[in-house]
Amino acid sequence: MKKHLKTIIVITSLMIIGCVTTRPPQTSQGYSDLNGAPKWVTAPGMEGGFSAVGSDKIGAAGVNFAKTNAVAFARDELARSMQVKVKNFVKNFVNVTGVGSNETVDRVSTQTSKQVASQVLNGSQHRDTWVSPSGVLYALVVIESQKLKKSVKEASLSSFKKEDALWQRFQADQSFKELDKEVDKLFSE
């Protein structure tokens, strides 16, 4: 079982490391608003861990509201980089009517995509904030590798303990069933 547990931890860690991607956030004005931005805004890579950047325009609700949203968006990005379920549907339709120079082509293309992420981000921290000249607040959220490894290991051990407990419960149930059979035999004679 310990060998199996180590394999699960290694595979999970590799999947997490292999799935993390970084891409610069884009504002409604494009990238020109990012002049003077700290490096983590456009390249949120982190040595010894994982990071993501979220952003939100500071509006009438104020800075705290934008900061809360930016941090939430960054955590969402972290979760999606670790595990995401994607459903995608593409439908194309082409219709040609007429002949020769009177020919018309109608084309319809529909694309629908849905992404869902569900990931516990133990140890994620809001590390830094920057506000662009146009009032877009950027938040950097990080998870250190050691904290992530510890979290994955604890989750694996917890699930191992649950499996172990379930096995013991199964064995106890089997013993009770066997005892009931023996008691039934004893009293039916």
Image (cartoon, rainbow, N blue to C red):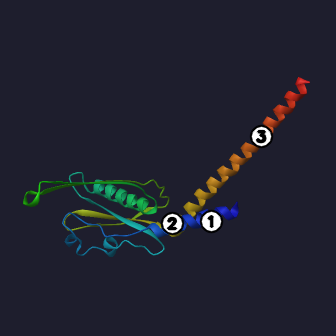
On residue 22, the disc is none
Position of residue 20 measured from the top left corner of the image (x, y, whole percent) = 43, 68
Mark closer to the chain start, 2 or 1: 1
Residue at (37, 61) in percent of width and height? 74
Amino acid type, callout 1: Thr
The residue furthest left is 101
Q: State the CA–CA distance, disc 3 to disc 2.
A: 38 Å
Position of residue 45 measured from the top left corner of the image (x, y, whole percent) = 40, 73
127 lies left or right of 179: left
Q: State the CA–CA distance, disc 3 to disc 1.
A: 30 Å
Position of residue 4 measured from the top left corner of the image (x, y, whole percent) = 66, 62
Residue at (75, 39) in percent of width and height? 173
Marks 3 & 2, CB-CB < 8 Å contact: no
Compared with 172, 186 (above or below) is above
Instruction: Label 1, secondary structure: give it.
Output: helix
The residue furthest top is 188
The residue tagged 1 is 7
User: Would you call the spot at circle 3 few (<14 residues within 10 Å), some (14-19), or many (20 or more)?
Assistant: few
Query: In which quadrant is the N terminus drawn?
Result: bottom right
Amino acid type, callout 2: Met
Position of residue 151 measured from the top left corner of the image (x, y, whole percent) = 55, 60
Instruction: Label 2, secondary structure: give it.
Output: helix
Mark closer to the chain start, 3 or 1: 1
Q: Nearer the viewer, residue 175 or 67?
A: 175
On residue 15, the disc is 2
The residue tagged 3 is 174
